[in-house]
Amino acid sequence: MRKSASAPNRTRNRVRAFIFRKRRLLAAGILCAAAGVAVEVFLPPDPATVQVVAASADLPVGTVLTADQLSVVHLPEAAVPEHSFGSPDLVAGQQLATPVYAGDILAQNFLVGAGLLVGSPEGTVAVPLRPADASTVQLVAAGQRVDVVLSTGNGFEVSAKNTVLARGLPVLWTSEESGTGPFSAPSGTEDGLVVVAANPDEAAALAGASSTGQVHLVLTAANSSG
């Protein structure tokens, strides 16, 4: 009986001795655990995230977007770009007005349509032009600026005359950049078409220009003003 009674005592003594020898280490561990709990209590909660649509691959201008070219990412609400999209269904089938890299968050100004005029002065409109030389379309691209020149007369019965209708207009879109365009038109009627941004006065001068003479586009420096 003495042996069986003394065994628990020896065990307790060993535990007490171990705790006494390791008391500093154990105390440090307890303090670290308490500090961790305290820090976690005072940390701000994870910010709310918002679902947005991004490109899943590098895509060229003019791409008509399909579901497999789109991905969904979650960003903190404060980091979400204005005019972005919350669902791939809102983007699929639309056409890129600018090249994008994989991971770029897509917004309205990336797409052909009303978004092309984002940031333009109030009253700016998109005006389609058909240059007399269709090959000109191959030389211009969205973002470049052009002067629009109207040539009338033939130099024989009617004296030739060149009139600058507008200067430094930004190009929004060209039919060379894709097989489809921003306007509802029968297939093939958009060949050789260039869309530029213009103020109302310039738009009035450009309207119907192709029917009164030959329209020519002249590339200008990027700092030209309209």
Image (cartoon, helix red, strand yellow):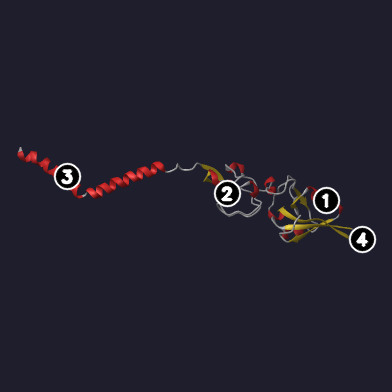
Under mark 2, the amino acid is: Ile
Judged by depth in the image, the label closer to the viewer, 1 or 4, is: 1
Q: Dot 4 surroundings within 10 Å: few (below 14), some, or many (20 or more)? A: few
Quarter containing the C terminus: bottom right
The residue most toward the top is 1
User: Where 136 sits versus 190, above or below?
Assistant: below
Q: Do the residues labelled 2 and 4 touch (CB within 8 Å)?
A: no
Under mark 1, the amino acid is: Ala
Instruction: Return the x and y of residue 60 as percentages of the image width and height.
Output: 63, 55
Q: Distance between the residues labelled 2 and 3?
A: 62 Å
Q: Name the residue under label 3.
A: 16
Give 165 or 224, whichever is nearer the viewer: 224
Give the left or right position of residue 56, taking residue 185 as reference. left
Q: Name the residue under label 2.
A: 105
Q: In which quarter of the image is residue 159?
A: bottom right
Q: Name the residue under label 4.
A: 159
Q: Mark 1 points at which residue?
A: 205
Q: How far apart are marks 1 and 2 (CA)?
A: 37 Å
Give 132 or 42, whichever is nearer the viewer: 42
Q: In which quarter of the image is residue 136?
A: bottom right
